[in-house]
Amino acid sequence: MAPSAQQQLEIEGQGRRESAVVSNGAADEAVAGGAKSRVTVVGSGNWGSVASKLIASNALKLPSFHDEVRMWVFEETLPNGEKLSEVINQINENVKYLPGIKLGKNVVADPDLEHAVRDANMLVFVTPHQFVEGICKRIAGKIRKDAEAISLIKGMEVKMEGPCMISSLISQELQINCCVLMGANIANEISVEKFSEATVGYRGNKEIAERWVQLFNHPYFMVSAVQDVEGVELCGTLKNVVAIAAGFVDGLEMGNNTKAAIMRIGLREMKAFSKLLFPSVKDSTFFESCGVADLITTCLGGRNRKCAEAFARNGGKRSFDELEAEMLQGQKLQGVSTAKEVYEVLRHRGWLELFPLFATVHEICSGHYPPSAIVEYSDHTPKFSLLEGSARIL
Ligand SMILES: NC(=O)c1ccc[n+]([C@@H]2O[C@H](COP(=O)([O-])OP(=O)(O)OC[C@H]3O[C@@H](n4cnc5c(N)ncnc54)[C@H](O)[C@@H]3O)[C@@H](O)[C@H]2O)c1
Ligand SMILES: O=P(O)(O)OC[C@H](O)CO
């Protein structure tokens, strides 16, 4: 007999608890075999720094990890002439990307990329997506053969042969397995230990996923794992496009109902696009932290939303590059470039009319439409019925 709705919720809750506390077995085995894992975080921006803090705190507590967590820093010189990596090591704080937060004494900032990754068997990738390919090319053949990777990066690349998710790019370039971790995770909130959840997406090997869950899980950062790497990664990637749309609505002062409508339409396009690209993507993934929860938090409080609001307030007269540089002080937006990448896929595959919201976001960002087009073209056009058709097929 099929479980009742209540039973189903209990089963799902059980699964979540299992994922959140798993791995003591795997960890004990690793220690018994004398194989402590060494973790390197590739990236030290806003989220990269917070991820390092989370990992460093767990590495100290869990016997199956080396205490030291290496964090690769894209070196830069601060206005006072000091090197960022040196300041991080002196005061245990990323003064540029996460000021005021101690990372943990066991975080070692390393500006030498090859050196930082050389001894690690757990590689955490967390840079803006546009830099990943170059980074992978620099370290290919210079990492441990038994290394495992996880990507916290929300974005995609579009190649001649089609779209390429960042986890696939890492896998292909480095010849290693790559899981993903996405969720409703505004880094500044997690840095002060406010409760949030995240989702690990994995392909086949559940034990590896459990190891990642163990590395990240905290009482204030509850991680669960689902076997749907593409679904999890596409949620994290595509929500940034919807966040831009939400920012336009805020900049135009259209109110909460309009913003909720944009989020609903956006979620539906996220699901339809993901399933057209990867039919294996599961509906249930959209109800995890990486799905609807990330969409909500990003449309309320993210950087993409914030810059898009300013773009609309200025009537599209100031470019996103200018606004990003002024408002984010070195942090990077992912939504504008992702909208362009998604648009390329839609155009190439003849799907533009199926995804009016995604397409309109790119048209506005690139100056072809005014910000107000977000409600004129995102839904009520005849094109929309095609999306309905596609949604029914899916
Ligand atoms: N910040 C968040 O709240 C958050 C939360 C979840 C996921 N993410 C995702 O994590 C990823 C990384 O974001 P972030 O917030 O850590 O970074 P960020 O936006 O703070 O980006 C700045 C980082 O890029 C580095 N950088 C600049 N030029 C570079 C170059 N040429 N090569 C390599 N690195 C360069 C900078 O040194 C800095 O570390 C993104 O995909 C983002 O969407 C961010
Ligand atoms: O600040 P944003 O817009 O890059 O979003 C941050 C995170 O992805 C929210 O989960």
Image (spheres, rainbow, N blue to C red):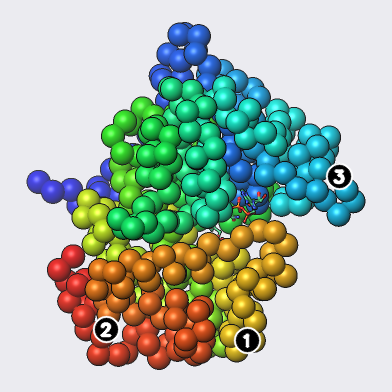
- Helix, strand or loop at label 1? It is loop
Q: Is residue 224 visible?
A: no
Disc 2 C-beta below 8 A from ligand 2: no
Mark 1–mark 2 distance (CA, rounded to whole Å): 29 Å
Given the image, on which type of amino acid does mark 2 rest?
Phe
**Residue at the spot x=60%, y=26% of the render?**
59
Given the image, on which type of amino acid does mark 3 rest?
Glu
Mark 1 in CB contact with mark 2 (< 8 angstroms): no
**Residue at the spot x=68%, y=49% of the render?**
192
**Residue at the spot x=46%, y=64% of the render?**
338
Given the image, on which type of amino acid does mark 1 rest?
Lys
Left or right placement of residue 118 versus residue 149 in this view: right
The mark that comes first in sequence, 1 or 3, is 3
Question: Disc number at residue 82?
Answer: 3
The mark that comes first in sequence, 3 or 2, is 3
Measured as percent of width and height from the top left, residue 132 is found at: 51, 47
Mark 3 in CB contact with mark 2 (< 8 angstroms): no
Question: Disc number at residue 384?
Answer: 2
Q: Quadrant of residue 160?
A: bottom left
Closer to us: 244 or 144? 144
Measured as percent of width and height from the top left, residue 345 is found at: 33, 66
Determine whether 343 is above or below 226 in the image.
below
Measured as percent of width and height from the top left, residue 65 is found at: 56, 21
Mark 1–mark 3 distance (CA, rounded to whole Å): 36 Å
Picture mark count? 3
Question: Disc number at residue 317?
Answer: 1
Question: Disc number at residue 111?
Answer: none
Measured as percent of width and height from the top left, residue 80 is found at: 90, 51
